[in-house]
């Protein structure tokens, strides 16, 4: 029965509220850290998936290689500014032809098998 008085004193002094607040804060921190770990793992999976993709042949005009002909002319439609304000900022756009002329992206390569240069055995 001696422990009863200690619990009663702790209860009367507001000690249980402090213990409950500490437990609530600990659970909140634990949840926040767990969510950060899950987000980090998700981001890592996305980065690994992106690392295994071959480079996309994209021109400086941000259009895919398939939009360019053999001479390098782009056939994609884009918005072209036709009216500007006093600060030389475009105010009106119309559809027009992309003016890019040269594809300057990574060249797509075929799958090639190459033997190892050194014998590891």
Image: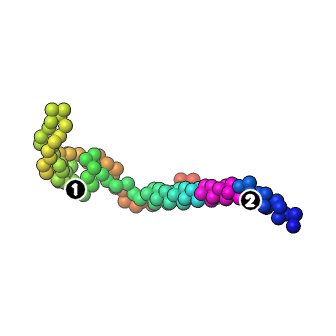
Which residue is under mark 2? Answer: 11
Q: Nearer the viewer, residue 51 or 29?
A: 29
Residue at screen point 53% across, 53% down = 117
Query: Quadrant of the rendered structure where residue 92 is?
Result: top left
Q: Which mark is residue 24?
A: none
Residue 41 lies left or right of residue 94; in this view the side is: right
Instruction: Note whether 24 is above or below 83 in the view shown.
Output: below
Q: Which mark is residue 67?
A: 1
> Residue at 17% of width from left, 49% of height from top?
79
What is the magenta range? 16-29
The C terminus - image quarter: bottom right
Q: Could you tell me what secondary structure mostly forms the magenta stretch?
A: helix
Res 116 visible: no
Please report the residue visible at 36 percent of the width from the left and 56 percent of the height from the top.
109
Q: How is the image coloured?
A: rainbow
Q: Secondary structure at mark 1?
A: helix
Q: Residues within 10 Å of mark 1 (few under 14, many from 20)?
A: some
Q: Is residue 23 magenta?
A: yes
Q: Residue furthest bottom?
A: 1
| Nearest-to-viewer mark from 2 and 1 | 2
Which of the two labelled residues, at mark 2 and mark 1, occupies the earlier sequence position? 2
Q: Residue at x 21, y 49 (%)?
A: 72
The answer to whether residue 18 shows anywhere in this view is yes
Q: Nearer the viewer, residue 4 or 89?
A: 4
Residue nearest the observer in this picture, 8 or 63: 8
Element under label 2? helix
Vertical placement of residue 113 versus 85, above or below? below
Which image quadrant for residue 34?
bottom right
């Amino acid at each position: 029965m001696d422990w009863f008085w200690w619990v009663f004193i702790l209860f009367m002094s507001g000690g249980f509220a402090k213990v409950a607040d500490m437990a609530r804060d600990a659970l909140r921190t634990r949840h926040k850290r767990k969510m950060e770990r899950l987000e980090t793992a998700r981001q890592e999976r996305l980065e690994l998936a992106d690392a295994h993709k071959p480079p996309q042949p994209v021109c400086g005009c941000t259009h895919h290689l398939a939009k360019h002909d053999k001479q390098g002319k782009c056939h994609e439609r884009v918005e072209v500014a036709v009216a500007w304000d006093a600060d030389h900022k475009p105010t009106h756009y119309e559809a027009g032809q992309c003016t890019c002329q040269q594809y300057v992206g990574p060249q797509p390569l075929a799958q090639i098998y190459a033997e190892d240069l050194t014998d590891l055995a």
